[in-house]
Structure formats: C-alpha cells, structure tokens
Amino acid sequence: MRRTGRLTVALILACAVSASAAMKPHMDHEPKHGGVFFMAPDRTHHLEGVLLPAGTFKVYLFDEYTRPVPAKGFAAVMTVDGVDDGRKLKLDLDAADGTLCIRDLPMKSFPVDLTVWITFPPRAGEPPRTDLFSFSFDKFSAAATR
C-alpha cells in the first residue's frame, strides 16, 4: 500500500512538472497540420504553412503557446517562385477555419517555393509590421491535426 502511495505521489508530481513545462511560451515548434512551421520575428506569433492538393495554400497562426489565433486582422500576399509573371497573390481569410488561404495556386510541379509577406496587426503604440517567410514543399503537406 505504501509503495502504491509513493508511486501515486510520484506520478502526480511528474504530471504537474510536465504541465508547467508545457505552459511556457515557445516550447512547442512542431507543425500541427503537417506543414512548415516558423516562429515569427515579432517573437510572439508562430505560423504554419500548408500546401494541399488542388493548389490550396493555408497559413495557420498561433500565439507564443502555440494556441490557434484567428487570422482576422492579419494580411498576406505571396509569390510562387519560378512562375513567370511574378505577380503578388493575395491570401484571404478563410472563415471556416480562421486561416489565411489562397486556392488555385499557379504551380506546375514539385518542388514548390513560396515567398509570403505577412502583415501582423499593430501592437500597442507600434505600427503594423510585415515579415517575409519562405516556404518550400517537395510534396503536399500531410494535413495532420493534433
């Protein structure tokens, strides 16, 4: 009985330590949707780019604890490297899942390299900031969810 009590206490302590470690910011940089994951230069946001069949590209946004953040208030444009016209394509808010999204990308074959400029909403007393992200895909994203 004593042994079970000690084991129970040890398990409770291990779980508490594990939970407190999980609550620290910037500890989780694993893709949530099978894509390419970044920490943004603002040192708060994280983002994940996902390339899906039919030429759909999505950007999922997260806070410093990798909790989902709706893309409302963010803006993004992108180019598809190697496409002749070089025009910037706008990503729109996908209200269904809160991502920035574009469909029907002009992609010919893999690898696909995307250059994306994301404008983050302004912080208190600061103007909005735009940062560049480069996404490279050798295949479609796994589209896994955790």
Image (tube, rainbow, N blue to C red):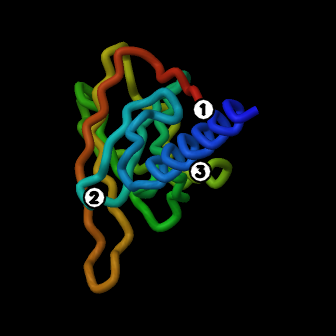
Identify the secondary structure beneath mark 1: loop
User: Which residue in the protein does label 2 denote?
Assistant: 43
Q: CA distance from mark 1 to mark 2?
A: 24 Å
Residue 62 in view (yes/no) = no
Depth order, front residue of 122/5: 5
Q: Quadrant of residue 146?
A: top right
Question: At label 1, which amino acid type do we have?
Answer: Thr
Q: What label does residue 145 carry, if any?
A: 1
Identify the secondary structure beneath mark 3: strand
- Is 35 left, or right, of 8 in this rendering? left
Q: What label does residue 46 carry, if any?
A: none
Q: What label does residue 94 carry, if any?
A: 3
Q: CA distance from mark 1 to mark 3?
A: 17 Å
Residue at 41% from the left image edge and 54% from the top image edge: 24
Residue 33 place in picture, x, y as percent: 53, 32
Q: Nearer the viewer, mark 1 or mark 3?
A: 1
